[in-house]
Amino acid sequence: MQQNSYLQREITAAREVYNDTVLQWNKAIQEWPTKMIVAAKQGYTTRIPFSTSKEVKEQARAVFF
């Protein structure tokens, strides 16, 4: 049970880091004029933050070990 809790905390932390990075990325490529122009020329687009459904979260709370 401890390992399951540990893994859940690690996954949550990784998801928060990813979502923070995506938020920074999305803000950066919308900055006018330089970053927006470069992003358009390079084909960079916004990214979608990670999210999950309530059912998946409930399943993740189950005992795996």
Image (cartoon, rainbow, N blue to C red):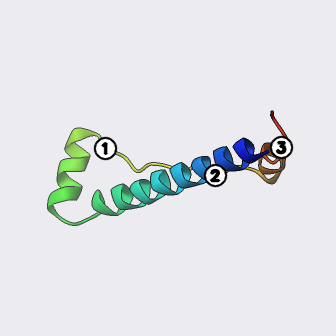
Labels 2 and 1 touching (C-beta < 8 A)? no
Q: Amino acid at mark 1?
A: Tyr
Q: Quarter of the image containing the C terminus?
A: top right
Q: Which numbered circle lies on residue 51?
A: 2
Whole-number angstrom distance, CA of label 1 to CA of label 3: 35 Å
Q: Classify 10 Å Cα crowding around label 2: few (below 14), some (14-19), many (20 and above).
A: few
Q: Residue at x 70, y 42 (%)?
A: 3
Q: Secondary structure at mark 3?
A: helix
Mark 1 highlights which residue? 44
Q: Is residue 32 above or below residue 41?
A: below
Q: Residue tagged by mark 3?
A: 59
In the rendered structure, which disc, 1 or 3, sits on the residue that comes first in sequence? 1
Residue pushed farthest bottom? 32
Q: Is residue 47 left or right of residue 3?
A: left
Dot 3 alpha-carbon crowd within 10 angstroms: few under 14, some 14 to 19, many 20 or more: few
| For marks 2 and 1 on the same chain, the one whose residue lies earlier in the sequence | 1
Residue 42 position, x and y percent, is 22, 40
